[in-house]
Image (spheres, rainbow, N blue to C red):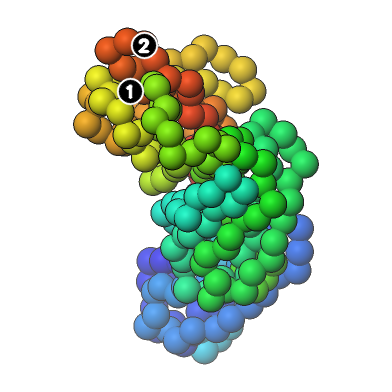
Amino acid sequence: LHWDAAPGPVRSYIITYQPEEGDAKELEVGGRVTERQLDSLISQTEYALAVTPVYDEGPGQPMLNSAITDVVPAPKNLRFSEVTQTSFRATWDHGAPDVALYRIAWSKKGEENFQYAILNSDETTHVLEELDPDTPYDVRVTAIYPDESESEDLMGTERTLSRDAGRPVPNAPPTNLVVYNETTTSLNARWTPPSGRVQTYRITYVPTSGGKSQTTQVGGKKTNVLLPKLTPDTEYSIDVVAVYANGASGDLNGLGKTKPLGGV
């Protein structure tokens, strides 16, 4: 929080901040101070703000404003490893140092019957077990903070190995789709390439709530793509297809969500 110095010999400033649903809090700073960080706020919440100069003869005219807190930081860099027919490991990086817990959820792609595990803040990896072979799974990791606020989900998709894993698979699809570096108007996606000789990758993306799909292509040696000009605060379904000389693979599908507008 920053403000312009009030005129005259200010003894102190009283900062008042109140969420749209909640009690006001106050703190006092010295008369030469013109900025202060406000901590322990509720994420995605509008606060009414007032900075009142205090003189020897009493309080002066308050300076008023409002601001909306951003979402708390989400975990980053979801990746998968140790893939078998019935399990795989998910690993991620901290989005912020003050996370209290992580919640990881997984379900078969397109289904909503998620299974959950709650992990301590120092646990950034988890093995998902008792899965079905040759099945894509959606994975979501959420950071939970000490004030019980929750981050946006970090999302990815991985497919378990088929029962005939190890045999060459013609026109195999890419695997391990991860969406990262989300902004209000763009998403980045990356994937693990198949073993065959891919000519190009075809990426199709569309809002899950409905709308016009868009398609782009990248060369067969690339394993990532930037999806620009998206709508803020919108979940997108993303399909990646490997295109070979003799045809296309099945699709690798995942979800990503752009950040909302209005954060500070």
Q: Position of residue 7 (x, y in %)?
A: 39, 73
State the SS at label 2.
strand
Tally the numbered discs.
Answer: 2
| Residue 38, label in figure | none
Please say whether residue 188 is visible from this viewpoint: no
State the SS at label 1.
strand
Indicate which disc, 2 or 1, sits on the residue closer to the N terminus: 1
Residue tagged by mark 1?
Answer: 201
Q: Position of residue 174 (x, y in %)?
A: 40, 32
Residue tagged by mark 2?
Answer: 247
Q: Residue at x 76, y 64 (%)?
A: 22
Q: Residue at x 46, y 66 (%)?
A: 94
Q: Residue at x 30, y 28 (%)?
A: 196
Q: Mark 2: which amino acid?
A: Gly
Q: Position of residue 29 (x, y in %)?
A: 49, 84
Q: Position of residue 15 (x, y in %)?
A: 56, 74
